[in-house]
Every structure is written in C-alpha cells, then in structure tokens.
Image: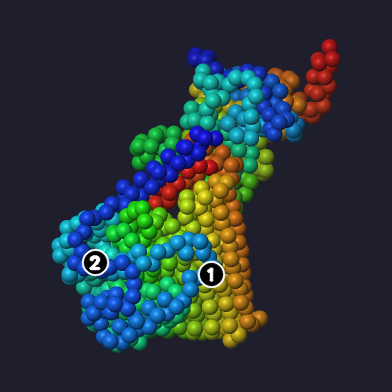
Amino acid sequence: MADKKPLLAFDDIHVEVEGTEVVKGVSLTINPGETHAIMGPNGSGKSSLSQALMGHPSYEITGGEAYLNGESILDMEPDERSRAGLFLAFQYPLAIPGVTVANFMRAALQSHRGKDADMSDFRKLFKAQMDDLGIDHAFATRYLNEGFSGGEKKRIEILQMAMLQPKVAVLDETDSGLDIDALKTVAEGINRFHNDSNGMLLVTHYQRLLNYVKPDFVHVMMAGRLVKSGGAELALQLEDKGYDWVAAEANQKVEV
Amino acid sequence: MADAAQRQKDDLSLLNADYATRYGFKDPVDYFHKGARGVNHEVVEMISKMKNEPRWMADRRHEALDVFLSKPTPQWGNTKLLNEILYDNIYYFMKPIEQQGKSWDDVPEYIRNTFDKLGIPEAEKNFLGGVSAQYESEVVYHSMREDLQKQGVVFLDMDSGLREHEDIVKKFFGTVIPTDDNKFAALNTAVWSGGSFIYVPPGINVEIPLQAYFRINAENMGQFERTLIIADKGSRVHYIEGCTAPVYSTDSLHSAVVELIALEDAYIRYTTIQNWARNIYNLVTKRATAHKNATVEWVDGNLGSRLTMKYPCIQLVGEGAKGEILSVAFAGQDQHQDAGAKVIHAAPNTSSRITSKSISKDNGRASYRGLAKIHKNAVNSKISVECDALLIGEDARSDTYPTMEIDNEQVRVEHEARVSKVAEEQLFYLTSRGLSEDDARLLIVNGFMEPFTKELPLEYAVELNRLIELEMEGSIG
C-alpha cells in the first residue's frame, strides 16, 4: 500500500430528499486496499448516502465535496461517475424487461471501454466471471433481474462489479435477502474482487456479511451522521448490544 | 427552458436529416408514363388499358371508384389529419419504366442504385427466396429462386399475376376485402397497381422468405399496391414487406390492400416493416381468412408516416384455425400511429392472440384500436389481447380503443393493457453502470420491443433496432 492517495474522499456531505435533509454532514476517506463498513439502523441515511454518491437525481447533495481518485465527482452524471471508477451495488436492482443480462453487460462494458473498443474477449470474460460466482450460464440470456430471486439479483450485482472492475465499490445492503449459502458465494465474489488497489464501502444494517468480508474500519451512522468509528470489533459489539448504546453515547457527547 | 426547446428542435431536425440521409434521397426520374393529378374514370380506364387488363377488372375498378367517391371520409380516428388529404393533388399512376427486369442488370441504374442503398440485392443473395421491388406504381424488378418455381410456387407482381393466372385472381380477388369495405379499400381497388401475387400449391413448404420492397420516389405520389396471397392446403409461406419514401414538404399517400387466404392446414406469416417519411399518409387495409386448422400470423411494424391507420385482421372461418397478430408502432414528433388488430372467430375451437406494442415520443401519439369478435357458433374459442404502451416525454400520448363482441359463453377471453413510462429508476440503474442516458433509454426501448424483434429474421431485427436508434437519437426524456 505504497500509494496512499485516497480513492474516495468525501467531506461534510449533506443530502436532501424531497426537501428533507437525510444526510447531515458525513466525511470519510477510503484509501487503496481498504474496506470500510457503514452500519446503522433503518432510516439512518446510509442508503441515501450511497444513492447520492452515485448521482441518483432524487438525492440532492446540498453541501460538501466528494472526490474519486482526486477528481471531484459532484458535477458528474451517474454514467460519468461509473466510467470514472465508482460502482454501486443496488439494494433493490431494477428489472429491465426484454434486455438480456449478456446484452446489458456488453453495453455497460462497452461504455467503459469506449464506443469503438474491441470487445472480442467479452464472451470469455463474462463466462469466467459467471463461473466464479456460480451463476448458471442460462442467466446470460434471461432478461435483466426479471423474475430473479433476491439472491439471484445480488449475485448479478456482484457479477457486474467483477466485470466493470471499479476503483471503489459501494455495496448497499448486499447481504439482505440472502440465505447463508448465497451470502457465502456473494462474499467470496467480493473478496475475489477486492485487492490492494481498489476500495470497498459496505453499507449494511447487520454485521453478518462482515463475518465473511472483513472490514478495516467500521462506522456507525445514525440520524444522518457518522457517530462512531472503529475497527472490525465494533461490528461485533453492535451485533451483541444493538445500536442503542451508541445512540446514548452520541447523545452524551452532544450534551457535553 | 428556451434552451431545451431549441435543443429539441435541433435534435428533431437532426432526426429528420438522418432519415433523409438514409432513405430520403430522391431520384430525378424521366417517367415512362406520368399521369395527371387527381382521380376520375378516365384515369381508371387509362390504368386498366395500359395494363391490358380483362374487362371484368376494368369494370371492377370503375365500380370501386364510384364507391370511393360516394363514401365519406371516416368519421373516426384522426379526422383532422384525414380531412387534410388533398385527393386532387395526388398522382395516382406513375410508370417509371416500360418493362420489368428479371435481373438487376435490366433495371435502370438510378433505380438499381436506390434498391442497392436500401440493401435489397444483398439481402436477396443472402436469405431470400424471391424478391419483388416496386418503384412508384409498378414493380421494376422481380425474381424467384428456380427450385421454388419448379415446385409450382407462384410469386409475381399483381399485374403479371392477373395476366398469367387470371382464373385464380378472379376467384379470390376482393373476396377477403370487398370493394365497399372502406373508402381507402375502394380507392385501392379503383387504381391499384403492383403489389404481390403469391400462390403456394398444396403441401409445399416455402422455407425461405419471399420479399417485396415498396419505394415511393415522387412527391404527391399515391402508391396503391394490391397484394393477394393464397396458401393452398397444407402449404407454408413467409412473406416480408418493406417500405420507404423520400422526405418531401407535401404529402404522399400509400393505400394498400392486402388479402391473405390460408386454406385448410396452411400457414401464412406476413411480416411488414414500414418506415415511411413523415409526410406519408399510410392507410392500409390488411385482412386474412384462415380456414380449417390453418394459421395466419401478421407481424406488423410501423415507423414513420404522418398518419398510419392500419388494423390487420384475421377471420377464423374454419374449425381449429389460429391467428396471431403482433404489432409495434413508433410515434415520434407530429406523428399519429393509429394501429391495432382485429380477430373474428366464426368457427369452433379457434384461437387468436394479439400483442400490440407502441412507443410514443415527444408529442407523438399511438392508438391501439382493436376488435375481438366471437360468433355464436365459435364455441371453445380463445382470444388473448395484450396491449403495451411506452411513453417517452411528458407530451407523448397513447390511447386504447378495444372492442369486444362475444356472442357465446363457452369461450376464454383475456385482455391486458398497460401504459408505462421509461422510469427514472431504470435509467438511473443503467446509467450507474456507465451507459449514457441516451444509450440507457435506447436499451429500455429495445427491450420493450424485444417480443416483436425476436420474431423477425435476424437481418430485419438488426435493421429495426437501427431504425429505432435513429428515432431515439437526441430524445428528450
């Protein structure tokens, strides 16, 4: 980890949804090779933060700065952010009727490589990645996320990540709706993808994914703010004791 | 907002320019025969004389003209646009060359170039069993593979069909669509010229598609091709039709009549991709009769034109007959696609399926107008109708006018209609993977069309996707 230039850095990010502030000043820096986890109860603003980072038009960033690889991303469209190396694995991936997984994946990869780039390796690459994630090749010709189970959708999200090889991957509740076998496969996929030159941000309510994907840093988000940060052990504490004690601590801090 | 409006305008002119570049080129033609504007009994007599027709056909034409002149313009659909048609300003008959070619070398170079640009000779080499190319009123090129000729398959332009197979034509002409069916069918019957005549003998399976291509070149041209396809007992045939025209500032009229007859156990599929310039009135009557255990399928794609009114129909007159109508329509700026489908069940154990997909963009309007009728005797019949409309932009419009007339109770009828918009969430999902918003929207639209596209021969599917891409370019979400 010689190069310590941050991959993703955001500073005092504020997000509004329909006029309501849901993220109230969050700062975080992810360096190459690092895995961060943001944990928090429902409604803490962690999913809004991920959507806003990717550029969802309904999540307006009203304050702060965000840099990907040293470049400000807030003026970029979602597709530009993607091509710059940001990836968001959706909590609820959308179905696109009539568009096969393979055609979609080819179009996405083509957009990353450029309109005229060679795609002759696509088929081989795609098959290899499907094999790694234990995805039946029949999925290649199925319509994207149409009629997929929760677990299948999440696997396809990880497949997209593996194909696009982003610099920073934000995984929004990727563990939700997965049974234990699916969770393990997905976690293996994440671990296979993760290396010294990329960064991970896991956004999750529960720590069960963190049993398989070890975070370097854990941050607790409550009411739109990061209220506590620590190492992997913090996730276990949350698992044991819930979120209330962190809330109490945070309130105390505010009061003092 | 002024910026956005200007951008939209620029995008649209670009779009038109694109059609113009690809299909909108015009040939300066010295016509062998170019009649006067307007239609009357003299024009009708002249057409019939030039074609050297038997008297019964000439009489049929004159009767039809009287019907056309006496029938009012339809009082339904887009009456505003219909009332704008200037019948006296239209050329009803133009003969580009004296004699039809059997090889592309026989066709004058400028016309050959036209069809070259449209990719017809290339397609003919690669995957077609026969090709007919119509330019204005007449077929200028025609050929069919020898093996099919040997099997007795007849694929001719309609004029030659009448000359060489008068008995068959006389037996079936106008039996599916009578002269007085509607104003435009009457007009077609009066001034028809060109089109395709196909007869497939009993038991013959024409494995590769036969294709006709209709090209309007002149301004204010009226093209009135007449197509008659008869599949005799147990035979099979797939016919494909494509249409384009240049871009002019004043309107042209395309008013075809297509009659299909599938005799016992026969199968006919009729595939159309019409891609008209935006000043074409496309008013077409298409109807099929399916006899006992026969199957008829209309695969009907409508792009371009100013106003299209087209409702392919299947009459299931024999027990066990099946019909399927699969259509898509794309209505862009200032266009109205009034399309739909009709199925008439007149025998027991008949089944039909209608799948209609429409896309409206900018201020375009797509209407589905459908009829599903089950007669009293058509017990144990099934109809399924599915209409799917996709709207792009705030001003796009879609309407559905389904009519159901069910005269017996031992039937199963399903009807589903959906209107959807390209959802912001879907766009975000796709753009978050690196696709530009335009590419994302195009992907969603192509996906929407997929149930249709997958029914096309590969070459046509590719072409259709390309046409949709042209239509979608610079679209304003």
Q: Which residue is disc 1 drawn over?
A: B75
The amino acid type of the residue labelled 2 equals Lys
Residue A47 placement (x, y as % from top left): 67, 33
From this view, report whether residue B218 is shown above or below residue A236. Answer: below
SS under mark 1:
loop
Residue B35 sits in quarter: bottom left
Q: Which of A241 and B182 is in front in this view?
A: B182
- The correct choice, above or below, for B76 with respect to A26 in the image is below
- The figure's colour scheme reads rainbow
B161 sits to left or right of B105: right
Instruction: Give residue B226's mark.
Output: none
Quadrant for the N terminus of chain B, please.
top right
Q: Earlier in the sequence, mark 2 or mark 1?
A: 2
Q: Is residue A54 visible?
A: yes
- How far apart are the two marked residues, 2 and 1, measured between alpha carbons? 33 Å
Q: Label 1 neighbourhood size at 10 Å, few (<14), some (14-19), many (20+)?
A: few
Q: Circle 2 sits in a helix, a strand or a loop, which is it? A: strand
Give the letter of the chain under mark 1.
B
Q: Name the residue under label 2.
A: B34
Position of residue A1 in the picture relative to residue A223 (left or right):
left
Q: Nearer the viewer, residue B270 or B280?
A: B280
Please provide percent x and percent y for residue A31. Answer: 56, 19
Q: Position of residue A141 (x, y in %)?
A: 48, 52
Give a yes or no on whether discs 2 and 1 share a subunit: yes
Residue pictured at 52% horizontal, 55% vertical = B365
Q: Do the residues labelled 2 and 1 touch (CB within 8 Å)?
A: no
